[in-house]
Amino acid sequence: MPSTHTLGSITVTALLDGTGPFFQPRAAAFDGATEAQWREADRRDPDAVGPDGGWMLPFRAFALRRGDGPVTLVDAGIGPADALAAGWAPVPGRLPDELAAAGIDPADVRTVVLTHLHSDHVGWAGPLFGNADHLVQRAELAALELFHPELPARLLGPLRADGRLRVVDGDTDLTPGVRVLSTPGHTPGHQSVLVEQGDDRLLVTGDLLVHAIQLIDPALPYAHEENPPEARRTRERILRTLSPSSWPPPPDRPFTPTPTCTPPDPVDHEVGGIFDLRNCR
Ligand SMILES: [Zn+2]
């Protein structure tokens, strides 16, 4: 059963499409990380360490829903066997089974927010969610040369032809309590999704944060950021704006408590997916 997290009347469900080893030694992904930082990251997120000491990567999507109303899905996973990510990710993913286990009919998904257009975030976008607009930042579409060459023909063109490609510029309100934030750097039009209900806040980060080591040192560049200085500025701005400044004890998966907010009860966690702000004041 997928993990859920509730803020007010909104339920956030973490859907695991697949898990697989990163395609490089992890030290190459975070050049400059120290041994002490790796030890602390491994202590906080032991599931991210594979049997050979490499980086074990969960590929997630997140469903946001108020009651039994329409669903907003954030990211679309690695996709089926013939997906664009097939060359490196552990396809086929199992998002359809995860949705079924969560009681979500894909027909009830009305919005798919694509945090960015890397192949492990767009896998199930398109036909599976036939009633959904797909929301992408204009800056991302202006940089298509960065992405899989088949992306326009296989996904963006058909969505545009159906009138289901929704292009936005910068921060954008989606539904009451749900807002897209522009978080560029990993890619030019990267976006994250902020959920706010009363004093509770939660951020679905996308690849703004991809590993616990970036919570230990947000200045650490990730090798696959298009613009590392911009990614660092965005990461530091978001962490400064949305959270205070000390770290909680190791959290449970798959939701991550914010660095200074000590939750009154166990909170699930996942780095690289969601940032739980509910106890920040
Ligand atoms: Zn990415």
Image: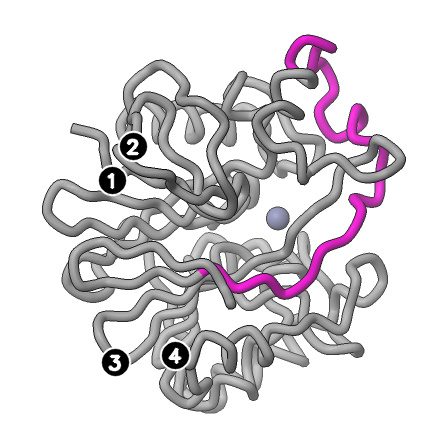
Q: Residue furthest right?
A: 52
- Amino acid type indicated by mark 2: Pro
**Is residue 55 toward the left or the right of residue 258 in the image?**
right
Q: Comparing marks 2 and 4, which lies closer to the viewer? A: 2
Sequence-earlier tag: 2 or 3? 3
Residue 141 vs 242, above or below: the answer is below
Sequence-earlier tag: 1 or 2? 2
- Amino acid type indicated by mark 4: Asp
Q: CA distance from mark 2 to mark 3?
A: 27 Å
- Labels 4 & 3 near each other (Cβ < 8 A): no
Asked whether 269 or 116 is in front, the reply is 269
Picture quadrant where residue 278 is located = top left
Q: Secondary structure at mark 4?
A: strand
Q: Secondary structure at mark 3?
A: loop
- Which residue matches tag 3? 68
Tag of residue 133 = 4
- Which residue matches tag 2? 263
Sequence-earlier tag: 2 or 4? 4
Quarter holding the C terminus is top left
Queried whether the magenta region covers residue 28, the answer comes back as yes
Q: CA distance from mark 1 to mark 2?
A: 8 Å
Tag of residue 278 = 1
Q: Residue at x 77, y 53 (%)?
A: 20
Q: CA distance from mark 4 to mark 3?
A: 19 Å
- Amino acid type indicated by mark 3: Asp
Queried whether the magenta region covers residue 96, the answer comes back as no
Residue 271 pos. (x, y %): 53, 39
Asked whether 227 or 129 is in front, the reply is 129
Q: Residues in magenta?
A: 14-37
